[in-house]
Image: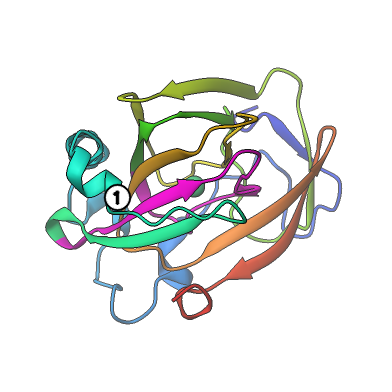
Amino acid sequence: MSVPVTTSLPAAGSASDPVPPAASQTVPPAAAASSPPSTDAGPSPAELLGFVRSVASDAELISSLPLDPEGRTWLRLDGPGGSEAWLIGWPPGTGTGWHDHGGSHGAFATASGTLKEDSLAARLPTEGWKTLELAEGVDRERQLAAGEGRAFGRHHVHEVRNDSEDGHAVSVHAYYPPLPLMRRYSRTGAVLRLEQVERPEEWE
Ligand SMILES: [Fe+2]
């Protein structure tokens, strides 16, 4: 089976069906070229990783991000080649929850503190389901200390947290194309549930 997940509500075929490209229906007109994101001539995941690592080493820029003990803070950056980029501050105990990136690929790097990423080594069907039961063995976990980063493809699903009890973390993120949407999920054991689809206007 090509996709190591099973659908509990198979609304649009079985989990082993080919996954259609996310681009044709989800990319807004401004970003919708005739090609899907994977063939767009924007910065590659590796190039975005180079960018976020470089920014993460810019101590002056990193220190310009206001930090708030009550919640995460954001500062928008100019990403390379039309990408979307952010500096994010994470108080102890904060995290993103499970989400995807609407078909964009990207990269992030920790500038200070340590972030933990939980991710899925499985490609989820993009549309047509509300809950999925994840197969055993698809969970991945990594710690990203200051100076460490990772790139990810356009089907990446993850959550990122600052598990520190007393220290802020700061990280740099870049996405290409600019995020057309984000799907947010809840997770109970092996069951992943689609909770919300957020559009850029909701996080401006
Ligand atoms: Fe993310």
The residue sitting at 61% across, 38% down in the picture is 92
Magenta highlight range: 82-106
**In the rendered view, how is the structure colored?**
rainbow
- Quadrant in which the C terminus appears: bottom left
Q: What is the x, y in percent for residue 23? A: 41, 63
The residue lying toward the viewer, choosing from 49 and 122, is 49
71 w.r.t. 191: above or below: below
User: Would you identify the image quadrant in which residue 35 lies?
Assistant: bottom left
Q: What percent of the width, then of the height, locates residue 199?
A: 52, 74
What's the residue at 58%, 70% (across, down)?
A: 198
Along the horizontal axis of the image, is 45 left or right of 28? left
The front one of 65 and 46 is: 65
- Helix, strand or loop at disc 1? helix
Q: Quadrant of residue 31?
A: bottom left
Task: Say whether residue 86 is left or right of residue 194.
Answer: left
Amino acid type at circle 1 is: Ser
Query: 61 left or right of 190?
Result: left
From the top left corner, tell me how far across and down residue 129 is, in percent. Answer: 74, 57
Residue highlighted by disc 1: 38
93 is within the stretch colored magenta: yes
Against 120, residue 38 (above or below) is: below
